[in-house]
């Protein structure tokens, strides 16, 4: 049976960690798939030096409105950015022009990762599921 944990990001506050960092500190992260119609981004987490499939997990982000970053990185420090950064991105891409930007933190969070290569990953999304089985996310 696959392990699964759903994280409603809107329950987290700026500065909160998204992952148990000790468990994933030695992992390689790869953008595995993006489905535009459903706004789902799947990121594979594979522990370095391990080749057993039972050690591979996926981050399945839902309601993805924005992504900026490399296609692969080595860092597990995913955290919630300040609300104003999330609202600023949504203002720039003009997705929710009819909603007060003060209300957007009720629905979205900006997840950031500081990679080992001085690059930053940014994902504006509403929730993430950590799972070993991505079949329900692939159409």
Image: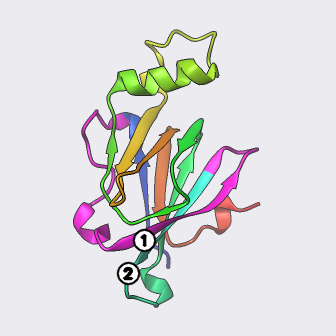
Q: Residue at x 46, y 84 (%)?
A: 54
In this view of the protein, can residue 106 be seen by the observer?
A: no
Q: Position of residue 7 (x, y in %)?
A: 40, 49
Local crowd at mark 1 within 10 Å, few (<14), some, or many (≥20)? some
* The C terminus: image quadrant: bottom right
Q: Is residue 26 magenta?
A: yes
Q: Looking at the picture, tell me which residue is in the foreground, 48 or 115.
A: 115
Callout 1–callout 2 Cβ contact below 8 Å: yes
Range of residues picked out in magenta: 11-40
Residue wearing tag 1: 28
Local crowd at mark 2 within 10 Å, few (<14), some, or many (≥20)? some
Q: Is residue 135 magenta?
A: no
Q: Residue at x 46, y 15 (%)?
A: 103
6 above or below 133?
above
Q: Position of residue 69 (x, y in %)?
A: 51, 49
Quadrant for residue 8, please give it: top left
Q: Residue at x 66, y 68 (%)?
A: 135
Q: Is residue 34 left or right of residue 81?
A: right
Residues at marks 1 and 2, CA–CA distance in whole angstroms: 6 Å
Q: Is residue 95 left or right of residue 85?
A: right
SS state under label 2: loop
Q: Is residue 137 left or right of residue 106?
A: right
Most extreme residue toward the front, as rendered? Answer: 118
Residue wearing tag 2: 48
Q: Is residue 19 left or right of residue 124?
A: left
SS state under label 1: strand
Colour logic: rainbow
Q: Residue at x 60, y 35 (%)?
A: 65
Q: Position of residue 39 (x, y in %)?
A: 66, 44
- Return the disc, 1 or 2, that comes first in the chain's sequence: 1
């Amino acid at each position: 049976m696959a392990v699964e944990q759903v994280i409603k990001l809107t329950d987290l506050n700026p500065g909160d960690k998204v992952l148990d960092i000790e468990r994933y500190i030695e992992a390689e992260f790869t953008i595995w798939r993006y489905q535009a119609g459903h706004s789902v981004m799947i990121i594979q987490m594979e522990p370095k030096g391990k080749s057993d499939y039972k050690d591979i997990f996926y981050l399945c982000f839902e309601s993805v409105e924005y992504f900026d970053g490399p296609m692969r990185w080595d860092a597990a420090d995913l955290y919630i950015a300040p609300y104003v950064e999330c609202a600023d991105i949504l203002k720039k891409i003009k997705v929710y022009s009819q909603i007060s930007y003060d209300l957007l933190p009720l629905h979205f969070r900006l997840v950031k990762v500081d990679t080992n290569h001085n690059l930053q990953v940014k994902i504006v999304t509403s929730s993430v599921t950590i799972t070993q089985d991505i079949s329900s996310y692939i159409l």
